[in-house]
Image: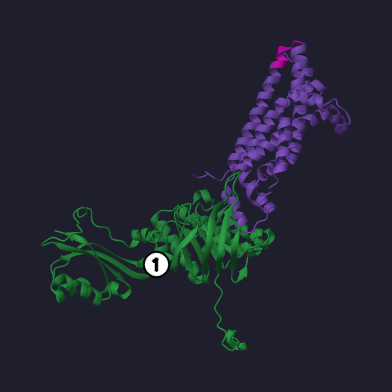
Chain colours: A purple, B green
């Protein structure tokens, strides 16, 4: 599988780094979705005249989300170190790296989910209201199920972006493939390691994207048999 | 000095006459939208008085922007009236809070122009949705949905998704869904406007069946006069947020009072002057020309053998230029454009004979 010029130690390092990357991305995406889903739904339904109309809260959260999203990730990592230490008990290592990744992922996922929910035909919301549905029922039975294919595509995009972000957490000793590439491939001048790291990342991204696409297509009943 | 008033003068001694409450009643209802930043408030509806008798089908017709969309949404609280009262089965609903409206809405079904079915749910699950929302137990939902799908003729499409259905089938699912909670009232928001004429007829037939067999009162809005003609017992014509005319469909169609009504019904009752005669019709009589008449047949008279009688009794030649016989709200109605010799006394005799037959005849003009 690997070129024979890579030593067994390097190969095991690549394995460990891949595992670290996957762990960081999966946990950050999981927690990010846990918070991002309700946040995204709220952003999509709380403007004036909408289901949970709360224009002030909507505007405030919008600013907060934008602020987080416009901060370059590498700066965010450093800026929230005190918070990271508070949550993870340390500011160094893979566990600590999950904190800034999650902080970056949550607003990103929220915006993607907001977009997906806003795409749902307002006629469906009206129909559900006409049935006597409560706002919570409308979210659970109409908005989220109808937006699900778009949500899955959004989460796929978020996962791919997180794989990219995770390469930067090496700056705080986060480990993972990006860190490996920088420390061995670049600083120790081992181009074969660098090439392998890039190849693994490409395969990961391809895998995530094609699984996401396939899942979204299966969930989308709109043009299935057209 | 005031006359003494007897205690029973206000009906204490008279028999109480019980008139059933109309299914829906609008009393001086208005709807005004607040103006956006510095703009004047916009009045969408004003002074709406309308009663939909229980068990009837009432159609509101108007052009787009006339306010019919707002009107129908006031009935289930998707829009709130800003003036007047709305009563459903005698119970006032204006002033209900959101929770009160939610309860009310389960008694009112609604179908839509674009069907508004959930693409992520099968036909079965779409019809089940209002029952899930109402908290009906699973087993009861299954039995109910099967029955409804059989009613609308889609029992075999239960596991399909809306994207696999035709427009007419989608609307049938919409109707089944609207009936799921056993409503007393069905609101139809341009329910056939996205359908072709043939499918429209089949959906209208289904609505009529639902009305007759289940006794459900239907309030529909449309811009298509054939819809009114086909199934509505009563019609209201709306323009610029006001009802300009209302009444039984047949009498409104055969004797429209308002110009807007006249324009609408023209399309289904009127007979146009054929193109080759247009421009040849003069208002001034000349020697030896013919009189063009429009004869209107209503009710029983619609089937009278008028032309042969005119020829036989008066002895004039009647030349038919154009005509149509149709049914409005189930009653026959016809209109005929004819020409007769305009010389006296024959023309007078013809007009007299038509009057005797109880037909309406108007002189359109003269042709040579």
Q: Is residue A29 visible?
A: yes
* Residue occupying image coordinates x 48% and y 62%: B243
Q: Position of residue A195 (x, y in %)?
A: 69, 16
Please state which of residues A128 and A156 is positioned toward the viewer in this rendering.
A128
Q: Position of residue B131 (x, y in %)?
A: 63, 61
Q: Position of residue B331 (x, y in %)?
A: 36, 71
Quadrant of the rendered structure where residue B5 is?
A: bottom right
Residue at the far left: name it: B288
| SS category of the residue bearing label 1 | helix
- Is residue B285 within the magenta segment? no
User: What is the crowding at mark 1: few (fewer than 14 residues within 10 Å), some, or many (at least 20)?
Assistant: many
Q: Is residue A2 visible?
A: no
With respect to residue A78, does B210 lie above or below?
A: below
Please state which of residues B39 and B320 is positioned toward the viewer in this rendering.
B39
The C terminus of chain B sits in image quarter = bottom left
Residue at the far front: name it: B1
Q: Mark 1 = which residue? A: B252
Looking at the image, residue B329 sits to the left or right of residue B20; the answer is left
- The residues colored magenta run A188-194
* Residue occupying image coordinates x 50% and y 67%: B210
Q: Position of residue A212 (x, y in %)?
A: 63, 36
* Residue occupying image coordinates x 63% and y 50%: A142
- Is residue A192 within the magenta segment? yes
Residue at the far top: name it: A189
Quadrant of the rendered structure where residue A15 is?
A: top right
Report in which chain the residue with disc 1 lies.
B
The N terminus of chain B sits in image quarter = bottom right
């Amino acid at each position: 599988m690997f070129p024979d010029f890579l030593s067994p130690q390097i190969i095991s390092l690549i394995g460990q780094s891949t595992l670290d990357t996957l762990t960081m991305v999966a946990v950050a995406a999981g927690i990010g979705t846990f918070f991002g889903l309700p946040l995204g739904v709220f952003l999509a339904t709380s403007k004036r005249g909408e289901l949970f109309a709360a224009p002030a809260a909507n505007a405030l959260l919008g600013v907060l989300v934008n602020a987080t999203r416009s901060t370059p990730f590498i700066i965010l990592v450093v800026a929230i170190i005190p918070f990271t230490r508070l949550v993870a008990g340390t500011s160094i290592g893979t566990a600590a790296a999950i904190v800034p990744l999650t902080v970056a992922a949550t607003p990103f996922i929220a915006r993607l989910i907001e977009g997906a929910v806003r795409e749902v035909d307002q006629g469906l919301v009206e129909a559900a209201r006409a049935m006597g549905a409560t706002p919570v029922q409308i979210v659970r039975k109409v908005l989220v199920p109808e937006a699900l294919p778009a949500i899955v595509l959004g989460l796929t995009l978020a996962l791919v972006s997180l794989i990219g972000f995770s390469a930067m957490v090496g700056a705080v000793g986060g480990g993972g493939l990006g860190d490996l590439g920088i420390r061995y491939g670049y600083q120790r001048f081992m181009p074969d390691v660098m090439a392998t790291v890039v190849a693994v990342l490409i395969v990961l991204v391809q895998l995530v994207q094609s699984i996401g696409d396939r899942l979204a297509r299966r969930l989308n009943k709109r043009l299935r048999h057209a | 000095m005031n006359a003494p008033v007897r205690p029973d003068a206000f009906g204490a001694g008279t028999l109480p006459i019980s008139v059933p409450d109309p299914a829906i009643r609008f009393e001086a209802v208005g709807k005004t939208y607040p103006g956006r930043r510095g703009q004047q408030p916009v009045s969408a509806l004003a002074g709406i008085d309308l009663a939909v008798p229980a068990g009837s089908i009432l159609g509101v017709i108007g052009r787009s922007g006339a306010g019919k969309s707002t009107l129908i949404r006031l009935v289930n609280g998707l829009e709130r009236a800003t003036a007047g009262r709305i009563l459903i089965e005698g119970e006032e609903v204006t002033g209900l809070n959101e929770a009160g409206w939610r309860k009310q809405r389960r008694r009112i079904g609604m179908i839509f122009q674009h069907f508004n079915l959930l693409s992520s749910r099968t036909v079965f699950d779409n019809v089940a949705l209002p029952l899930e929302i109402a908290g009906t137990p699973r087993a009861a939902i299954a039995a109910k949905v099967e029955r409804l799908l059989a009613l609308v003729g889609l029992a075999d499409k239960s596991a399909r998704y809306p994207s696999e259905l035709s427009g007419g089938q989608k609307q049938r699912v919409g109707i089944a869904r609207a009936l799921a909670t056993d409503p007393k009232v069905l609101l139809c928001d341009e329910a056939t406007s996205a359908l072709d004429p043939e499918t429209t007829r089949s959906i209208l037939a289904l609505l009529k069946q639902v009305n007759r067999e289940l006794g459900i009162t239907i309030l529909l809005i449309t811009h298509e006069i054939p819809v009114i003609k086909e199934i509505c017992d009563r019609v209201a014509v709306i323009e610029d947020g006001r009802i300009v005319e209302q009444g039984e469909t047949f009498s409104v169609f055969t004797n429209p009072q308002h110009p807007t009504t006249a324009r609408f019904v023209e399309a289904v009752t009127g007979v146009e002057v054929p193109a080759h005669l247009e421009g040849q019709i003069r208002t001034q009589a000349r020697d030896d020309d013919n009189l063009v008449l429009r004869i209107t047949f209503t009710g029983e008279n619609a089937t009278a053998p008028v032309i042969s009688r005119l020829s036989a009794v008066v002895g004039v030649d009647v030349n038919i230029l154009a005509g149509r016989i149709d049914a409005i709200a189930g009653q026959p109605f016809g209109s005929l454009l004819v020409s007769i010799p305009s010389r006296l006394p024959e023309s007078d005799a013809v007009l007299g004979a038509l009057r005797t037959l109880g037909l309406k005849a108007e002189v359109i003009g003269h042709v040579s």
